[in-house]
Image (tube, rainbow, N blue to C red):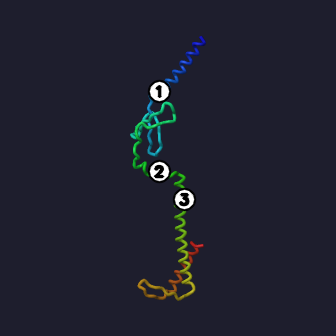
Amino acid sequence: MRNRLAHLTILIFVACIFSSGITVAKNEVYRWVDENGVVHFGDRPDGNSDAEAVKIDENSSHNITPVTNPPSATANEQLEPEPSYAQQQRDEREKKRKENAEKKAAMTAMCESQHQLVAALEPSTRVIVEQQDGSTSRMDDNDRLERLGAAKTFIAENCN
């Protein structure tokens, strides 16, 4: 009786091993790439026209080879992949640094021009200016003081 039970157990064990091998051999596996470039495997093609059947080597669970030639790359796959979130953040910070540097350079140039204007208007009451038509004339004192005040205000508010 014991001997018979042992034979029966071994027979069931061997039958399970063979039946699992047959089941794997009969099942088809499909491979497809989604719109984000992620490769998926499944027992159904998931309604995807790019899904391809793959052949699984029965002797090894690691070797998977496509049954058909891989589809040619579409226009979207040929494009450069979208940068990661971290890379996007680095790019955004770099863009802001450049914008701030450009603003600082423009402000420095404005401050310099206002300093030059103060240097030209403050010490002398007789300021000669060139008109648009090329002629020269003396600047009115009220106009000179108005421009001088505006330049000093700009320097006080915007320059170090």
Give the Cα distance between marks 1 and 3: 55 Å
Given residues 111 and 92, the one toward you in this image is 92
Question: Quick one: which residue is furthest to the top in this view?
Answer: 1
Compared to residue 82, the image places residue 146 above or below, namely below
Q: Nearer the viewer, residue 97 or 159?
A: 97
Residue 153 at x, y percent in the picture: 56, 76
Q: Are marks 1 and 3 in contact (CB under 8 Å)?
A: no
Task: Please provide percent x and percent y for residue 76.
Answer: 41, 49
Q: Which one is earlier in the sequence, the residue at label 3 or at label 2?
A: 2
Q: Amino acid type of disc 1?
A: Thr
Query: SS of the residue at dot 3?
Result: helix
Sequence order check: which comes first, mark 1 or mark 2? 1
Q: Which residue matches tag 2? A: 81
On screen, residue 140 above or below 61: below
Q: CA distance from mark 3 to mark 2?
A: 20 Å
The residue identified by callout 3 is 93
The residue positioned 43% from the left and 51% from the top of the image is: 79
Q: Is label 3 or label 2 in front?
A: 2
Please tell me which residue is depicted at 48% across the width and 43% down the height of the picture: 38
Question: Which quarter of the rendering shows the N terminus?
Answer: top right
The residue indicated by pointer 1 is 23
Residue at disc 2, secondary structure: loop
Would residue 40 appear left or right of 108 to someone viewing this image? left
Amino acid bearing label 2:
Pro
Q: The residue under label 3 is which amino acid type?
A: Arg
Which quarter of the figure is the C terminus placed in? bottom right
Q: Position of residue 23 (x, y in %)?
A: 47, 27
**Mark 1–mark 2 CB contact (< 8 Å):** no
Crowding at dot 3, Cα within 10 Å, few <14 / some 14-19 / many 20+, comes out as few
